[in-house]
Amino acid sequence: MTEQQFLNELELALTTLPADERNDILSDIKEYFINGREDGKSDSDIAASLGSPKEIAQELVEFPIPENITTENKVIRIPQTNYSNVRMNINYGSLNVFPSETDETIIELIGENDKLKLTAEVLNDTLSIQLKSKKFQFFSFIFLIKEMKVNVALPKKLYSTIIMKTDNGRIRAEKMLGKAIKATSDNGSIGLKEVAATVLEVKTDNGRIEMDKVQTDKLSTQTDNGRIELRNVDAEKVITETDNGRIVMEYVNGDIIGKTDNGRITLLTSSLDRMIQLETDNGSIIVETENKPTDVSIHAKTDHGRVSVFGDKNSRTVFGNGTNSIRLSSDNGKITVAKKSMA
């Protein structure tokens, strides 16, 4: 369903509401579609996340949106820093995590209202932050289109675990240091920048994943629907997978396993002397390197498309002893391995 089809159905179902209320709701829906497209979602995905226009209209008619649903922002300050684990669970809205300017932990809810409950407490060595609805589940649609934001400022230190989760909203985090860091969203994009961790896991059911300036031993990224963009990643092993969307990697070090069911895969790197496995069912694979490999065996296979490995059409090319294995596979698309132009 396209945005216009969704709006038309919803407007028809809202005929019992006053015109000004109807226009406000439709305006909010338009903004929600704009935000969704910025996250890399299609109109049909955005419409599916909203639900049936008829059910939405029924909810809004039975439980009208209060005129002043938003009050003032809410701030929670936690002076103690004697915790090593952080768990954040946000049912409604987006989550932003960044370093605190002091040793104090600051949690801020932007757009606080009386239907939501923000809690933050330290239990044993774990800081738990939660944003939930108090009891009015029928307000879920309202919270969806009137996005809330939770900002979390964490003191600068090494954490044992940092877990970030949203049910329906973006996750943005920067300048974090942890042994294990995990970010998951049921419906929202995830963006991480300047993050260091032993194990880093990122997963969203619907939305793009963007990462820049990351150091980790093991990186795992997965999205059911959305592109994945990894830049300046220093890792021992990288596993990246999307069911529907392209994969873009620029200067990603370490062994790589990349797979997409529908979309192209591109890799720009300074060196290919390592284990790399890239696979797409429908899309091209383009690998560019600043330096030719010295100890690699490249296997390229496509059912429908051309193969070019440094200008040759060989399905198998060996450099040196061929110790490292690079396997590139596409069911429908060309495969290109080339030296990057330094122009």
Image (spheres, rainbow, N blue to C red):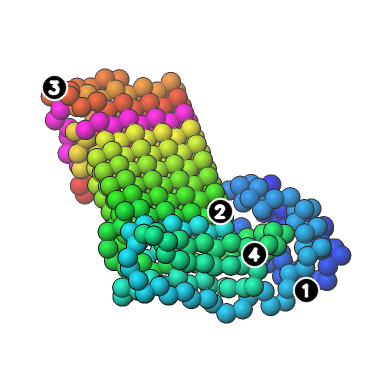
| Residues at circles 4 and 3 in contact by the CB criterion of under 8 Å | no
Distance between the alpha carbons at the discs numbered 4 and 3: 64 Å
* Most distant residue in the bottom direction: 72
Distance between the alpha carbons at the discs numbered 4 and 2: 16 Å
In the image, which disc is placed on residue 134?
Answer: 4
Instruction: Name the mark nearer the viewer: 1 or 2.
Output: 2
Under mark 3, the amino acid is: Asn
In the image, which disc is placed on residue 167?
Answer: 2
Instruction: Name the mark nearer the viewer: 3 or 2.
Output: 2
Classed neighbour count for the residue bearing mark 3: other residues with Cα under 10 Å, few (<14), some (14–19), many (≥20): few
Under mark 1, the amino acid is: Asp
Location of residue 222 by image quarter: top left
Classed neighbour count for the residue bearing mark 4: other residues with Cα under 10 Å, few (<14), some (14–19), many (≥20): few
| Residues at circles 4 and 2 in contact by the CB criterion of under 8 Å | no
On whether residue 333 falls in the magenta region, the answer is no
On whether residue 292 falls in the magenta region, the answer is yes
Under mark 2, the amino acid is: Asp
Q: Is residue 198 left or right of residue 123?
A: left
The residue tagged 3 is 321
220 relative to 336, above or below: below
Q: Residue 140's x, y, as percent? A: 67, 59
Q: Is residue 39 left or right of residue 308?
A: right
In the image, which disc is placed on residue 20?
Answer: 1
Q: Which comes sooner in the sequence, label 3 or label 1?
A: 1
Q: Residue 189's x, y, as percent? A: 48, 53
Q: Which comes sooner in the sequence, label 4 or label 2?
A: 4
Is residue 192 visible in the rendered structure shown here? no
Which residue is rendered at x = 52% and y = 61% of the image?
A: 130
